[in-house]
Amino acid sequence: MADALLELRGLSVAYGGVRALEGVSVSVPAGGAVCLLGPNGAGKTTLLRAVSGLLRFHGGRITEGQILYRGRDVTGAFAASLVQDGIVQVLEGRHVFPDLSVADNLKAGGYTRRDRRRANERLAEIAELFPVLSQRLRQPAGLLSGGEQQMLAIGRALMGDPQLLMLDEPSLGLAPLVVRSIGETLRRVHAAGVALLLVEQSAALAAAVTTDGFLLETGTVRASGPTRDLVDDESVRAVYLGVSQS
């Protein structure tokens, strides 16, 4: 795919002797917004770990296939180098540094960037995206609400100036109003030119934020197409998302 920012070609991943992904091919266009749908255990988080270089920390390994980023083979590359290249992941469960201030959490996200002027610009942009964080810069991150911690995790990732932002279940455990707010923020991030790869169980959030999707089941791609078509399909919603249309 000539205009792909990220392209997975026939990717297979195993944990020990257990195959988690088998022959998966997924692409994210430059400036695109793509979601991964599927039930728990489908391999969605494994796919993100393979792309971000975190797979080795979970006992996994790529056994077949390639990961191309901007046309360059980055299969098995180290996480730090991938962050420097512009691939940044927001982990499931937020994982902020609870004892550090909000400001220090944000600064930690820009550790690979040496341009102080650009870092200050990013801080200002994040304050605009998440005004509540600018009001809590000196507060320990552990005292934030769940929604505020998710905002902080996204803000910290944006401090890395990503070209590809990957998010693993950003709506998990959050109130619907907070989920809508995060969805609006992600649309603004995407509109600014950042490509998105989103793992999400919320059909509403996936449809609001992304344009195209891939449906995973037991480590393989079962379907792909426009996100709205996938989440509106009754069988997809009932079997893979755990909801049904009224």
Image (spheres, grey):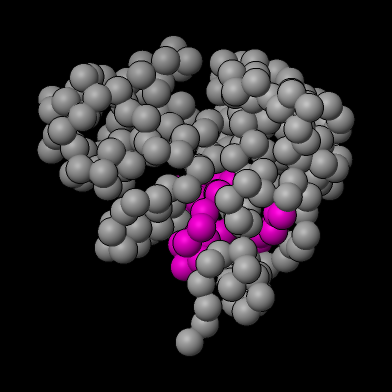
Residue found at the very far bottom of the displayed protein:
246
Task: Relative to 177, say whether 195 is above or below.
Answer: above
Look at the image and say whether residue 121 sits in the magenta stretch.
no
* Direction front: furthest residue: 17
Q: Is residue 175 above or below residue 112?
A: below
Q: Residue at the top extreme?
A: 114
Nearer to us in this view, 231 or 88: 231
Magenta span: 188-217
For this view, does 199 lie left or right of residue 25? left
- Is residue 6 at least partly visible in the picture? yes
Q: Position of residue 203 (x, y in %)?
A: 51, 66
Is residue 209 depicted above or below 119 in this figure? Answer: below
**Residue 110 position by quadrant:** top left
Apparent side of residue 212 relative to residue 243 in the rendered image (left or right): right
Near-viewer residue (37 or 207): 37
Left or right relative to 242: residue 117? left
Is residue 193 a member of the stretch shown in magenta? yes
Give how far across and how far down residue 142 sits, in percent. Answer: 20, 29
Q: Nearer the viewer, residue 211 or 201?
A: 201
**Residue at the spot x=57%, y=36% of the render?**
163
Q: Residue at x 74, y 23 (%)?
A: 16
Residue 126 visible within the image: no
The structure residue drawn at horizontal position 61% and vertical position 64%, both measured from the top left corner, is 240
- Residue 244: horizontal and vertical position, in percent? 52, 78
Using the image, determine if residue 150 lies above or below residue 73.
Answer: below
**Residue at the location (56% across, 64% down)?**
241
